[in-house]
Image (tube, helix red, strand yellow):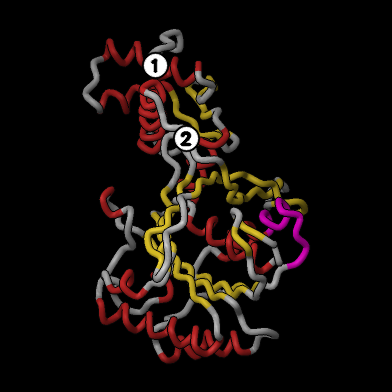
Amino acid sequence: MVHGPSGGGKTFAVLDWTLAIASATSEWAGNKVKTGVVVYLAGEGHQGLKGRVAAWKHKKQIKSLKMWISKSGCDLNTPAGYQKAAAQIRALPRPPSIIVVDTLHRFLLGDENSAQDAKTMLDACAALMQEFGCSVLLVHHTGVSEEAQHRARGSSAWRGALDIEVSIVPSKDGRPIEIVQRKQKDGELAETLYARIEGVVIPGWFDEDGEPVKSAVLELVEAPVKPTQADNKLSEHRKMFENAWWDSGAEDINGQPYVSRSALKEYLDKQDISKNTIQKMINPGETSRFIGKLINSNILSSNENGWVVNDKMMAQAMMISKDSN
């Protein structure tokens, strides 16, 4: 199972792994890859998923894939739903090496908090593994609270049945996504990996207005350096600006998150900050304070009557999160 919050990048990570399998890529993050057929059971976002696959192929210069993507979801933990999925998989030219279920919620009839309902889905996964001699990868959400981000949402029965459990910890304050292994049955845990979401223009794809279609891919990066006190303060400023962006309606200008001066003042006023302090915080000339510090660090730039996010990684993470909500 791979789990993470909505918009955190879990599907990007799962696609990066499984596309490596489907494309005969020799290795992923230093690990050998065994080529095979991938069946991707997608419960939603089919057009967006196709775009992500096309972006990955373009980025990696891959021409063909041994991959099949479903056109709809089904209640996989019911006899009818299982037979519907299994019949389609049996009809493929070759059996799969791995079946991805994305997301668990879209393929489960019942309550994910119920151990009994969890068992019916786990039984369905076991039946797929036995019939096709493959692995099954479940993509699932974490809970809403901060303390629930390290585990999958729902019954504890999920974790107990897993061979491998991986958390996708989303990017925060400009820091990279973390890929953290939480469980490895009969083996050692892998080291945490780090990644960013990189935007990609898909050649030959255009929207209804004739504009090029953009998607994104996962890009592994080096482990971040431990932040200093100054970095922590800058991270606080980043987070405050992002919170103000969400609070003001998550506007953007040409794909760059935008917050107007008036909206930012309104947000800061809600935080019980004095008007005199707010004026200093949003003054670009105050380079050691909020807006001045972000501009001086090339994270923001002025635009019309407000500011846009100039930092590429931060802007992409915010826009991807917006598109996922």
Q: Residue at x 59, y 75 (%)?
A: 39
Q: Which mark is residue 29?
A: none
Task: Judge left or right: residue 220 versus residue 7.
Answer: right
Q: Main secondary structure of the magenta part?
A: helix
Question: Which region shows up in magenta?
Answer: 54-64
Instruction: Determine if residue 70 is in view.
Output: no
Compared with 254, 58 (above or below) is below
- Give residue 246's position: percent from left, percent from top: 39, 38
Residue beneath disc 2: 174
Residue appearing at x 34%, y 12% in the figure: 279
Q: State the residue at coordinates (57%, 42%).
A: 221
Q: Quadrant of the N terminus?
A: bottom left
Farthest residue to the left: give it: 272
Q: Was residue 61 drawn as part of the magenta stretch in this picture?
A: yes
**Separation of marks 2 and 1 at Cα, in angstroms:** 20 Å
Q: Position of residue 254 (x, y in %)?
A: 60, 35
Say which mark, if any, is on residue 282.
Answer: 1
| Classed neighbour count for the residue bearing mark 2: other residues with Cα under 10 Å, few (<14), some (14–19), many (≥20) | some
Magenta stretch encompasses residue 307: no
> Could you say whether the residue bearing mark 2 is in a helix, strand or loop?
loop
Measured along the vertical axis of the image, is residue 211 above or below residue 230? below
| Nearer to us in this view, 140 or 49 | 140
When the figure is inspected, residue 271 is found, relative to residue 35, above or below; the finding is above
Query: Would you say 311 lies left or right of 212 here?
Result: left
Looking at the rendered structure, the kind of residue marked 1 is: Ile
